[in-house]
Amino acid sequence: MNFKEQSHILKTYKKFDIVLKRGEGVYLFDESDKKYLDFSSGIGVCALGYNHSQFNNAIKAQMDKLIHTSNLYFNETIARAAQNLAKASGLEAVFFSNSGTEAIEGAMKVARKYAFLKGKKGGTFIAFKHSFHGRTLGALSLTANENYQKPFKPLIKGVQFARLNDIKSVEKLIDKKTCAIVLESVQGEGGIKVADKKFYQDLRKLCDEKDLLLIADEIQCGMGRSGKFFAYECSEILPDIVVCAKALGCGLSVGAFVVNEKLANSSLEPGDHGSTYGGNPLVCAGVNAVFEIYENEKILERVSKLTPYLEKTLENMVKDFSFIKKRKGLGFMQGLSMKKSVKVAEFLKKCQENALLLLSCGKNDLRFLPPLIIEKEHIDEMNEKLRKSLKEF
Ligand SMILES: *Cc1c(COP(=O)(O)O)cnc(C)c1O
């Protein structure tokens, strides 16, 4: 069989001309055993890299015990995973889903239910320009990308988009119907834009004054990528709801939203929401292994320690190549904006030729989401491969 045969796969992705076969640490191997340095982590998912033995063994062990039970019964693995996530986020109660977009849907339902119980009509949302929250209809309604939205209208009513880091643009949009403000603590897909500390704190104040919920989408920037468990910690605020996925399961399909105590007691009730698989014992064993490994291998400390070196490496690239406009980002979530003359989509293929996997984002930006286990030498290797690709392009 030709593995590039696409006739039975719905064409929702423009795929690269690579067939991947296995992974080891921060490297991926294709059919001919070509070894790629992966600075994309399966779009920010594989924080522990590939074939991590402790992670794999935890999943294998759980597989022989119990894979699925439905959420009608208690199970120790699930209870532990929820406890781990509540503790890491500083919030109270967890709902597990199977993906990021589903977790966003759940968070939206929490916000509407909370408003409903308060007798507030409307249940409208404020999100931000250049946001990305997912592909299902609710999450898509919060995603400020006309290309993604247009063919699927009508979307849910009452979503307005403010400008990130412009508190006045948010204030202007708030009215009696507003129930929540939703933001990525660091925008990913839309082009690596960090929510400033002052802005995030002002949002928190605004939400407290007006009894609105602050929802942090940490699907991409969370789980250690910023050097903290969640990127909102860098702004010293606590959202009312945090939404998590991607690195949470390091490759297993799991997402979650976590709510504060107020919402745990006054929003969703039995019958309001559910998922047949969501957070089954298998994926929760994986989640627990992720938390254990983060602690054993001091993942957060490692990210914090290596971030200045990664940033310096990218800054030097900006200095040396006139067609790179600037560096932006937080921790191991970094971007380089390129001038129009360099088509990033094409440039990614040049990098692949030189055995480096990167991502694009925003209008014309390169995106770096390395596994969180990288060492200094991997940054040097990335630097070499990227410079070679830039020179050849
Ligand atoms: C990836 C992503 C999502 C969607 O997650 P899926 O698991 O693909 O549904 C939502 N928000 C952000 C910020 C993301 O990066």
Image: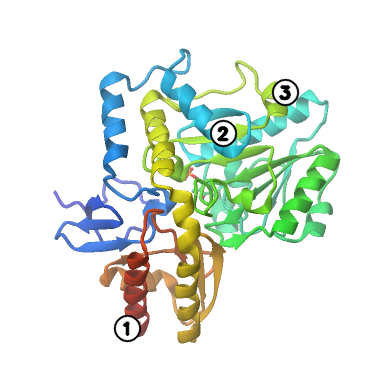
Q: Where is residue 166 in the image (x, y as percent from the top left)?
A: 76, 61
Identify the disc placed on residue 87. 2
What residue did someone put label 1 on? Answer: 392
Which is more toward the observer, 69 or 293?
A: 293
Q: Which amino acid does label 2 sit on?
A: Lys
In the rendered image, which quarter contains the C terminus?
bottom left
One can see residue 114 in this view: yes
Could you tell me which secondary element the residue under label 3 belongs to?
A: loop
- Tell me if label 1 and label 3 are in contact, CB under 8 Å: no
The percent coordinates of residue 266 (x first, y second) are: 72, 23
- Amino acid on which the number 1 mark rests in the picture: Glu
- Residue at image point 76% right, 46% down: 204
Q: State the residue position of label 3.
A: 266
Residue 143 numbered tag: none
Q: Describe the element under mark 2 as helix, strand or loop.
A: helix
Which is closer to the viewer, label 3 or label 2?
2
Residue type at mark 3 is: Ser
Q: Quadrant of residue 216?
A: top right
Ligand 1 is within 8 Å of the C-beta of the residue at disc 1: no
Left or right of 166 on screen, residue 241: left
Residue pictured at 63% horizontal, 29% vertical: 92
Q: Is mark 2 within 8 Å of ligand 1?
A: no
**Image position, residue 76 (x, y; %):** 43, 19
- Alpha-carbon distance for marks 1 and 2? 48 Å
The residue sitting at 37% across, 65% down in the picture is: 376
